[in-house]
Image (spheres, rainbow, N blue to C red):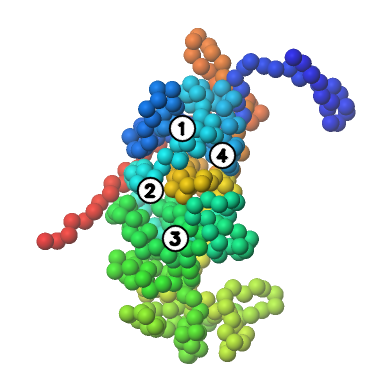
Amino acid sequence: MEAQFRQLFGGGKVEIRETEQALTPFGGLVVFLEYLARIGLVEKVEQCIPVKYTSPNAIPPAQTWVAFLITVVSGARRFAHTSWLRGDRALHQMLGLRRFPGDDTFRNLFLRFSVGNVQRFFEPMTEWMMERIEKRSEGYSLDLDSTVLERHGEQEGAAKGYNPRRRGRPSHHPLLAVLAEAHFIMHGWLRSGNSGTARGVVEFLKEALALWGERVKIRVVRADSGFFDDALLSFLEGRQLAYIVVARLTTLVKRELKRIEQWRELDDNYAVGECRVKLMGWSVERRLVVIRERIREDAAAVGKKLIDVPGYTYRVFATNLETVEEAIWRDYNQRADMENRIAELKHDLGADRFCLQEFHATEAVFRSILLLFNLLSEFRRASGIPQHKEPGTLRSEIFQCGGEMKQENGSPVLFLATGWGGLKQRIPLLSSILNWVIPKTPKFIPVPAT
C-alpha cells in the first residue's frame, strides 16, 4: 500500500509506505527502565499489590500497574490516551511484555482497589521509597498544602467547594505533604471537594510521620493560612516539631497587630515585629511574627491591609521557633516551591485528569501518580542530573528518542536515533545509574523508656 503527500514548502511529492519494523518514539526510556530495574520496582510491586486475578489469560496486575506508570511518563493524561502504546511493539520488547494493557484493563485494575487495598498497597510502597531518602544533617522541611482537582461528571466524592478558577464546578480536594529539599511527596490523601483545607490534617500527619519514623529529622513544618488551626499547632507542639504557619487575619489577630509598638526596620520598605497571643479557643500562648511592608506605587505589596493602619500591608506567621523575625519570613518564602510540585503533578502527569466513578479507585490512581512523581525525582538523582527537572522536561529531553528494535543473532537490539541525541547523550545517565550507591535510611522507632 502506497500514498503520497506534498511538502508544505516547495510542493515536492513524498511517497508514503508502511513498514513492519518495530519503531518507538520513546527509545530514551531505556535509562528510566534501567533505573526501575536497579531499584527492583517490579519485584516490590509483585510483593505488595493486593489485587489477584484467577483467569490464566489475564495480564498480571503488577504488569498492568507498571505499564500504567509508563503510559503517564510517556504523556498520557487520561485513560483514553493509554491505548497509544498498545501498538508500540518496540516499547513492549523494552519492557519485556508479551501484551500491553488497554484502557479498560487499567480501569478494571484500579476499580478493584477498596479503601483497604489502597492502604495495603501504597503504605509499604511509600515506605520502600522513603528507605532511599538521602540523609541530611540539617533535616528536611515538610510543606503542607491542598489543591483543587476539577471533575466533570458525577464521580464519588466530587462536590462543590473552594474552586478559585471555576466556581461551582465539582472537584476533589486532596491534601499533600512534601519534603521540600528532596522533592519527595511524603503522603497524599484524596478528599471530597467540599472538605476544608485543614480537615483531617492531624490524622493525615499521624499517618505520614508513622511511615517516616525517625529516618531523618523534620527541620520545620510549613503551611499557609488554611492550616492555621489550634488542633494542628497543638499536635506539632506535642510532637516537638518546629512550625511556621501563616496566621489568618481574624479580628482578634488584627487587634493584636495594632498593639505592636516596637518595629525593627529592615530597609526603607520592610519592618518586623512580634507579639505573643492566646486566641480564643487556644490553650497556650503562641508567638506571632509580623512582616510590615510599605505600600508603593512601583511594586505590588504582598499581605493584607489594616483599615486602622493605612499605608502598610501585613503578613503574620505563627511559629514556635525563636529565631529572628526575618529568618522566619525567609524560611517560609522557600515554601513557594510547593506550588511548582502541584503544577507538575497536574500539567505533566495528569493528576487532575485520571478519574473513575468510584472514589477509592480514583484515589488509587492519584496515589499511583504521586508515587511516580517520587520515582522520577529519585531517577534524576540516580542518573546524576544536578538539578530538579520537571517530568515534562525529562520526557522531552531524555525519554523521547526515536528507536528501532531489531533482532541480531537471536537477541533484541535497540537502535536510538542520533537526531535525538541517540546513545551518546544517554550513556552518561546509564553509567550513573549503574554506579549509583543506593542510599539506605532505615526506619528507626525509638523505644519508650520503661
Q: Is residue 144 above or below residue 276?
A: above
Residue 4 numbered tag: none
Local crowd size for mark 1, using a 10 Å CA cut-off: few (<14), some (14–19), many (≥20): many
* Residue 130 seen anywhere in this rendered image of the structure: no
What residue appears at the point 42 percent right and 75 percent down from the top-left corner?
Answer: 318
As helix, strand or loop, the secondary structure at mark 4 comes to helix
Instruction: Of the two numbered discs 1 and 4 on the same chain, state the one appearing first in sequence.
Output: 1
Residue 410 in the image, given as x and y percentages of width and height: 49, 10
What is the distance, in whole Å, between disc 1 and disc 4 at their CAs? Answer: 13 Å
Local crowd size for mark 4, using a 10 Å CA cut-off: few (<14), some (14–19), many (≥20): many
* Residue 230 seen anywhere in this rendered image of the structure: yes
Residue 115 numbered tag: 2
As helix, strand or loop, the secondary structure at mark 2 comes to helix
Instruction: Of the two numbered discs 3 and 4 on the same chain, state the one appearing first in sequence.
Output: 4
Residue marked by disc 1: 64
Residue 214 quadrant? bottom left
Instruction: Of the two numbered discs 3 and 2 on the same chain, state the one appearing first in sequence.
Output: 2
CB contact under 8 Å: marks 3 and 1:
no
Residue toward you, 189 or 279: 189
What is the distance, in whole Å, between disc 3 and disc 1 at their CAs? Answer: 32 Å
Residue toward you, 313 or 426: 313
Q: How many marks?
A: 4
Residue marked by disc 3: 143
What residue appears at the point 59 percent right and 19 percent down from the top-left corner?
Answer: 22
Q: Amino acid at mark 2?
A: Val
Residue marked by disc 4: 79
In the image, taking residue 113 as reference, residue 330 lies left or right, namely: right
Residue 355 in the image, given as x and y percentages of width and height: 53, 46
